[in-house]
Amino acid sequence: MKTKEKIVQEILKECFWDYHIAENDILKIVQGDDKRSKNILFEKILINSQNLFLALSLFKKDELKELLDNYKIPRFNKEYIQKRKDIVEFFLFSKKLNHKELLWTI
C-alpha cells in the first residue's frame, strides 16, 4: 500500500504539473477547513488523477460526500468528468450508475 507521501507526490505530478505547490501544502488543504481550496484540490484529482480512488482516499469520507454533492460539472470535458464523478459515487456511496457503457450485462 502506498504511503500518504507517495499519494501526494502522484497528485502533484498528475494534477498540479502547472503549479508550484509543495507536498505539505496538499496535506494542509486536506486537513484544513478551507472549503475553496478543498474544492480546487478535489476537482484537480477528479479530472486528472490516474489513481483516482487512491488520491481521493486522502479526504475523510463525509467531506468527500459533500465535495461530490456540491460539485458542478464544467462544460469542458463534461461527459468525461461526469462519468468519473458517477463512478466514484457508485463505488464509494452506492449511488445508482446510469451509464449503459459502464454497466455490466448478463
Image: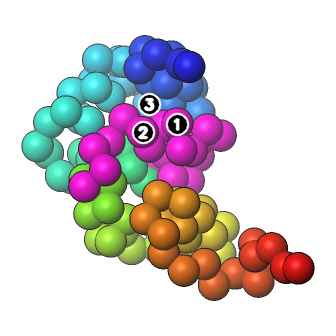
Q: Quadrant of the C terminus?
A: bottom right
Magenta run includes residue 54: yes
Q: Which mark is residue 54?
A: 1
What's the CA distance linking mark 3 and mark 2? 22 Å
Q: CA distance from mark 2 to mark 1?
A: 5 Å
For image coordinates 48% across by 75% down, the residue present is 95
Residue tagged 2: 57
Q: Residues within 10 Å of mark 1 (few under 14, many from 20)?
A: some
Q: Report the colour scheme.
A: rainbow
Q: Secondary structure at mark 2?
A: loop
Q: Residue 65, image x and y in percent?
A: 32, 61
Three-letter code, disc 3: Tyr
Q: Among all residues in the image, which is located at the extreme left?
A: 33
Magenta segment boundaries in residue numbering: 44-62
Query: On screen, 95 above or below 18?
Result: below
The label on residue 19 is: 3
Nearer to us: label 1 or label 3: 1
